[in-house]
Image (cartoon, rainbow, N blue to C red):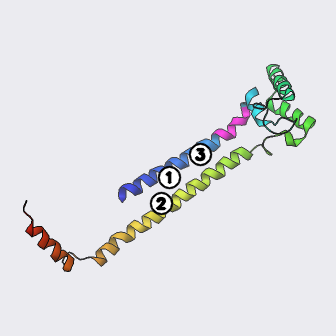
């Protein structure tokens, strides 16, 4: 049982570290995105049915070309995104707020981490109760009819 508890502790620690690294990485991801990153953050305004990076329409192709040209001239992703929002409305954003994806991932991993911690404490509590219960219910000298029958059957066999 101690091995199981050690494994759970290790997994809980790994989940916590992974959560921290993921949230940190996602928090810094928006700072320096390229054309493909911006295309993945914006919906195609023709039907709002997919992001610009995967949508196949004439308008989506034109907007991808515009993004690539403007970023090649040195415009930042934030300026281009703000221009697209001004032209097509806030519905053009794939995520309603800047931190929505980071928040979603953070909350998901926090829930997983909390569930692992609860599981760990429940298993630990059960492991602490189990030895006491086992000692209370069995004694080394307690025998019953089945023990005697088993001893008789084993004595009759030749090895």
Q: Main SS of the magenta segment?
A: helix
**Residue at the spot 64% in from the left edge and 41% down from the top edge:** 24
Residue 69 is left or right of residue 109, and the answer is right
Residue 124 is left or right of residue 36, and the answer is left
Viewer can see residue 142: no
Q: Which residue is mark 2?
A: 120
C-alpha span from label 1 to label 2: 8 Å
Q: Which mark is residue 125?
A: none
Task: Report which quarter residue 91 is drawn in.
Answer: top right
Q: Which residue is mark 1?
A: 12
Are the residues at dot 2 and dot 3 in contact (C-beta closer than 8 Å)? no
Quadrant position of the C terminus in the picture: bottom left
**Residue at the spot 45% in from the left edge and 54% down from the top edge:** 8
Q: Which residue is mark 3?
A: 20
Q: Is residue 29 magenta?
A: yes
- Give the image location of residue 49, x and y in percent: 81, 39
As helix, strand or loop, the secondary structure at mark 2 comes to: helix
User: Which marked residue is nearer to the observer: mark 2 or mark 3?
Assistant: 2
Look at the picture and state if 141 lies above or below 19.
below
**Camera-nearest residue between 145 and 28:** 145
- Give the image location of residue 5, x and y in percent: 41, 57
Which span of residues is magenta-colored? 25-31
C-alpha span from label 3 to label 1: 12 Å
């Amino acid at each position: 049982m101690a091995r199981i508890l050690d494994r759970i502790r290790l997994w809980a620690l790994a989940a916590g570290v992974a959560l921290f690294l993921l949230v940190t990485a996602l928090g810094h991801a928006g700072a320096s995105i390229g054309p493909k990153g911006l295309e993945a953050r914006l919906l195609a305004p023709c039907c709002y049915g997919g992001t610009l990076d995967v949508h196949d329409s004439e308008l989506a192709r034109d907007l991808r070309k515009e993004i690539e040209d403007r970023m090649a001239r040195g415009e930042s992703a934030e300026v281009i995104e703000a221009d697209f929002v001004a032209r097509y409305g806030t519905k053009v954003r794939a995520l309603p707020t800047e931190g929505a994806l980071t928040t979603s991932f953070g909350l998901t991993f926090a829930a997983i981490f909390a569930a692992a911690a609860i599981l760990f404490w429940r298993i630990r509590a059960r492991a602490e109760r189990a030895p006491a219960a086992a000692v209370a219910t069995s004694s080394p000298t307690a025998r019953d009819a089945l023990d005697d029958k088993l001893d008789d059957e084993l004595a009759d066999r030749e090895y």
